[in-house]
Amino acid sequence: MAVVINMPRLSDTMEEGTVAKWLKQVGDKVEEGDILAEIETDKATMEFESFHEGTLLYIGIPEGDGAPVDSLLAIVGEEGEDISGLINGADAPSEPTSESAVEAPASSATSEGAEIPEGVEIVKMPRLSDTMEEGTVATWLKKVGDKVEEGDILAEIETDKATMEFESFYTGTLLYIGIQEGESSPVDAVLAVIGPEGTDVDAVLNAKPSSGKTESVSKEPAKEEKVAEPVQESVSGTTSDGQRVFASPLAKKIAKEKGIDLREVKGSGEQGRIVKKDIENFVPSQKAAQPAAASEGAATSTIAPIALPVGEESSEVVKNSQMRKTIAKRLSESKFTAPHYYLGIEVDMDNAKASRAQINDLPDTKVSFNDMVVKACAMALKKHPQVNTSWEGDTTKYNHHVHVGVAVAVEDGLVVPVLKFTDQLNLTQIGASVKDLAGRARNKKLTPAEMDGSTFTVSNLGMFGIQEFTSIINQPNSAILSVGAIVEKPVVKNGQIVIGNTMKLSLACDHRTVDGATGAQFLQTLKAYLENPVTMLA
């Protein structure tokens, strides 16, 4: 019997997901445990596995498309089975799950109360797979009264398939536990309440939900009408007679990188489908320039014809990924709420180059200039705690710990993995940590906890030859350092012009927390560490 698979809610904050990649196509055999697709949220891209066996009969959300939680994702069943009724929403086995979200006791019983106070979050039992209808709390790792940070593991939740760690997406105090260890409850039942210490929990549990997100998810009708064409999903254009051009995802990606129009490529795959080798072997045809029409008597003219450019205007509209939308939102909020100002300084890197060469001559040791900058920042932050702060409206938060975030460029945008307690790490440890975090960031394997909690950020574009730039503050930080390339140029030393190596640094500061003089003193300290690297080895 065919089974409907809905878009899972992979965290209690997830409202929609984007299918980054389908790893199975319509007609493929599916075994229990096979990875069906990679699903992207604003936090991470996660593999989504099948809990059913059979044939993939239908794909409801094409690659690159986003859809709300509980939208029809796929149908798995027996080959040749009639699934028209399921596509049209009839007799879908998993419908009760989404309806239970609307009819959950916590929502219906509290519809007449006051609204939930600001800063208080009700955490619901998550649906950790598309088949999960209830979960059992195997272990609570936090108890009522404990402080909870975003990314902390709250509990271990057991389904019929596995026991999984469930992390918090909120910061505050654990005020209430709704499901005790060993107890089971349906998806969307109240699992816990997190908020400011001293909150009236009874009032929260009897409060009216401030928005109707659950209802809007369960009543989403539009996606059910969308019929995918997964076997030949990579439609990239049309031919001159209006026929669609089909290409594999890899061929489409390579063609885009090389600027090749797929309509000019002859496919060698099944039914003329364009594959990787067709793109690699493609030789563009030379389009002859169309001469301007000559007027009568032009043949006798002595004026040479003007060669005008001939081409075809084209453009492509690409859907923004969840990561790109999140980057846009957060950087816009930072730029338009924090009054930025910028300070620049030039650093003599001769001693740093010599020290790095000596360090890297040691066995099993590899240190980059960026590692030295990160270490110098961590030490300077300890001397200038005003820079290691966060603006919180009526108060300023002074962080006594130093967690340096390192900006890493990935395919879809930018992520900032965080080196915890950076000031306590030596150069070798920083180098190894940055290499590990950056590698997993590019492979989309970082956990949300590894990207949270920074108190200061370093962004380095020196490896791209950029000599000087400014960055937008990564809130809730108060500052971000922009690092340029090391440049060999004439400098004045001891009254003589000699060849030296210099690097420009730019510090963006939030004027609400960091005054100009404070930012300048921080840069002076940073410069002293970098120009005398031996001071960082103590």
Image (tube, helix red, strand yellow):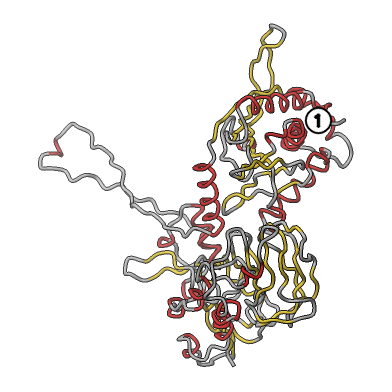
Q: What is the x, y in percent for residue 146?
A: 77, 60
Residue type at mark 1 is Ala
Of residue 151 and residue 345, the one placed in the foreground of this image is 151
Q: Is residue 390 visible?
A: yes
Q: Is residue 369 above or below residue 117?
A: above
Q: Is residue 259 left or right of residue 334?
A: left
Foreground residue among 365 and 222? 222
Question: Which quadrant, please, contains the N terminus?
Answer: bottom right
Per the image, label 1 sits on a secondary structure element best described as helix
Residue sitting at x 85%, y 40%: 365
Whole-percent x, y for residue 344 in the image: 60, 26
Q: Which quadrant of the figure contains the C terminus?
A: top right
Residue at x-position 54% and y-position 65%: 249
**Can you give x and y, in whole percent of width and height, for residue 406 in the image?**
68, 44
Q: Nearer the viewer, residue 94 or 502?
A: 94
Whether residue 27 is visible to the viewer of this picture, yes or no, is no
Give the labeled residue for mark 1: 357
319 relative position to 303: left or right: right
Q: Is residue 298 rendered to the left or right of residue 207?
A: left
Give the number of marks: 1
Could you tell me which residue is drawn at 45 percent across and 58 percent down?
318
Q: Which residue is at a point 52% across and 68% down the rendered structure image?
A: 63
Name the residue nearer the viewer: 399 or 69.
Answer: 399
